[in-house]
């Protein structure tokens, strides 16, 4: 079908979104697809994000298990964590997964180029080996990258990409930021035995999430040993004899083995020739697209983090699928970005879908149903852990507008609640569901009285 072009579709970027779009277009619609990737296949999620991060979460969670098991009568001893043993296994797993991605592409008939690609014109891609490829459609799926603040000696600090390759775990680390990545790695490294200090410039971590939920995460992180300083930022970094010296806004001057910036990610759109061909970029460098992921240049589309819409792997995959449906399936399919459930893999985890209490109460009158309690499993082990189950309910329609869970495995729980919230179910329909007992999440269907109106 490739007309006068070398390809029907040329994808730049072999991460979750790009690979999905390429293999579905080639495998299910039989179109001729090329894909260029200048790093490892699998992208941020598989190689330097969600997957290795989650494996590190698992590794770190074992730290508290011997003591907990002892409370249940087991005679077990904790031991030291061997970073090198874990890291070797982790890298082998990532190699395996990268192989899976490569095989998926090859199996669907996608031609791959292990090269950097830039856009030369509306239908031409230039590869780093000097060759060019023409395509009827070009899809940019280059993702994003972690950014350091603009300050002197910022290169002394590492970013999340570097964590998985450390030769050894530092004895102490300062993490800067209060978003997903800062909080997740603060918990992971704390669990692995690193002395973790976290500076966040705002009043409370995880800005944008439900206040009550982030308050509990923050409290639990401090309780489990993260030295969290709110309203604090760094002013100066310098290399000292025994580590990195850090001056901060709270007047402290301290030294850390390592400093990690988790201060946000930017779209990977620069130096790709995009603006020269008429693709519009936003202030952060995000590619501006319409609801069909189409740019100002009709033959060029963009999906995933490079568009800075909702920067989550499953969203990039959905955007890739919608693009293929629209362009090759003949069914114009806008991407639905409403009510996306997500989890922050802190310890305890936070799972969230829909509006926070603060967001909802700005729009309409709401009733809040919430309960915070010590869960059975850790309470028996005499641990202070608390969980939170919270529903934000519209007074007018009784629809559940938001659900916020802070609890072990909240990510798994919120996936299920996400279906009900997405389906627009009411509080009464939640209540009509018989509880599963004894569980933590049974509270979601047994909270009879609202704790407040907002
Ligand atoms: P976020 O945007 O979530 O957080 C960045 C943090 O850095 C904020 O706390 C911000 O503060 C702070 N910050 C920004 N600039 C500075 C500065 N100059 N000095 C000090 N602090 C600064 O970015 P992340 O890097 O944590 O994550 C990027 C995205 O990746 C997330 O938004 C999410 O979409 C995705 N992600 C999802 C995960 C999941 O689903 N579990 C896990 C990891 C990432 P302030 O709040 O004041 O702006």
Image: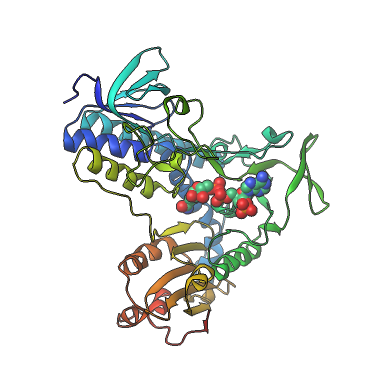
Please indicate, yes or no, whether residue 272 appears anywhere in the rendered image.
yes
Q: Give the answer, above or below, for where 309 lies relative to 69.
A: above
x then y, percent, for residue 294: 34, 39
Between 267 and 403, the one lying in front of the other is 267
x then y, percent, for residue 397: 36, 79
* Quarter holding residue 1: top left
Between 252 and 116, the one lying in front of the other is 116
x then y, percent, for residue 249: 79, 51
Colour scheme of this structure image?
Answer: rainbow
Relative side of 179 to 343, left or right: right
x then y, percent, for residue 88: 48, 36
- Most extreme residue toward the bottom is 449
**Which residue corresponds to the image point at 24% horizontal and 42% vertical from the top-left?**
326
Q: Give the answer, above or below, for where 20 lies relative to 122.
A: below
Relative side of 243 to 142, left or right: right
Please indicate, yes or no, whether residue 56 appears anywhere in the rendered image.
no
Q: How many marks?
A: 0
Between 87 and 305, the one lying in front of the other is 305
Between 105 and 84, the one lying in front of the other is 105
- Most extreme residue toward the top is 130
């Amino acid at each position: 079908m490739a007309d006068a072009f070398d390809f029907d579709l040329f994808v730049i970027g072999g991460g979750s979104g790009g690979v999905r779009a390429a293999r579905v277009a080639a495998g299910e619609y039989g179109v001729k697809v090329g894909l260029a990737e200048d790093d490892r296949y699998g992208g941020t999620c598989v190689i330097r994000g969600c997957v290795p991060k989650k494996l590190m979460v698992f590794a770190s969670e074992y730290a508290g298990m011997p003591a907990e098991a002892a409370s249940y009568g087991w005679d077990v001893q904790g031991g030291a964590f061997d970073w090198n043993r874990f890291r070797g296994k982790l890298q082998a797993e990532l190699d395996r997964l990268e192989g899976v991605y490569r095989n998926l592409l090859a199996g669907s008939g996608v031609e791959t180029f292990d090269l950097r690609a830039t856009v030369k014109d509306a239908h031409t891609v230039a590869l780093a080996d000097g060759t060019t490829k023409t395509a009827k459609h070009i899809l940019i799926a280059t993702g994003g990258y972690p950014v350091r603040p603009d300050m002197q000696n910022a290169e002394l600090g590492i970013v999340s990409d570097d964590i998985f390759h450390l030769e050894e775990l530092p004895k102490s680390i300062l993490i800067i930021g209060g978003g997903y990545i800062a909080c997740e790695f603060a918990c992971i490294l704390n669990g692995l035995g690193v002395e973790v200090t976290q500076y966040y410039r705002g009043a409370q971590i995880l800005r944008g999430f439900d206040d009550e939920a982030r308050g509990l995460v923050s409290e639990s992180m401090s309780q489990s040993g993260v030295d969290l300083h709110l309203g604090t930022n760094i002013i100066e970094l310098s290399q000292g004899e025994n580590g990195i010296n850090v001056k901060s806004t709270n007047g402290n001057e301290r030294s850390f083995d390592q400093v990690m910036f988790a201060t946000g990610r930017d779209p990977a759109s620069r130096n790709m020739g995009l603006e020269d061909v008429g693709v519009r970029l936003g202030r952060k460098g995000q590619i501006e697209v319409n609801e069909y992921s189409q740019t100002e240049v009709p033959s060029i589309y963009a999906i995933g983090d490079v568009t800075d819409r909702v920067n989550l792997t499953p969203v990039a995959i959905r955007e890739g699928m919608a693009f293929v449906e629209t362009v090759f399936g003949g069914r114009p399919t806008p991407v639905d970005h409403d009510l996306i459930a997500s989890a922050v893999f802190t310890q305890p985890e936070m799972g969230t879908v829909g509006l926070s209490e603060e967001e909802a109460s700005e729009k309409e009158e709401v009733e809040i149903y919430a309960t915070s309690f010590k869960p059975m499993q850790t309470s028996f082990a005499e641990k202070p852990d608390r969980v939170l189950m919270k529903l934000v309910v519209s007074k007018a329609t009784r629809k559940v507008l938001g659900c916020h869970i802070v609890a072990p495995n909240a990510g798994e729980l919120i996936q299920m609640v996400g279906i009900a919230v997405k389906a627009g179910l009411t509080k009464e329909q939640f209540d009509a569901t018989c509880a599963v007992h004894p569980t933590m999440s049974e509270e979601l269907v047994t909270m009879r009285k609202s704790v407040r109106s907002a």
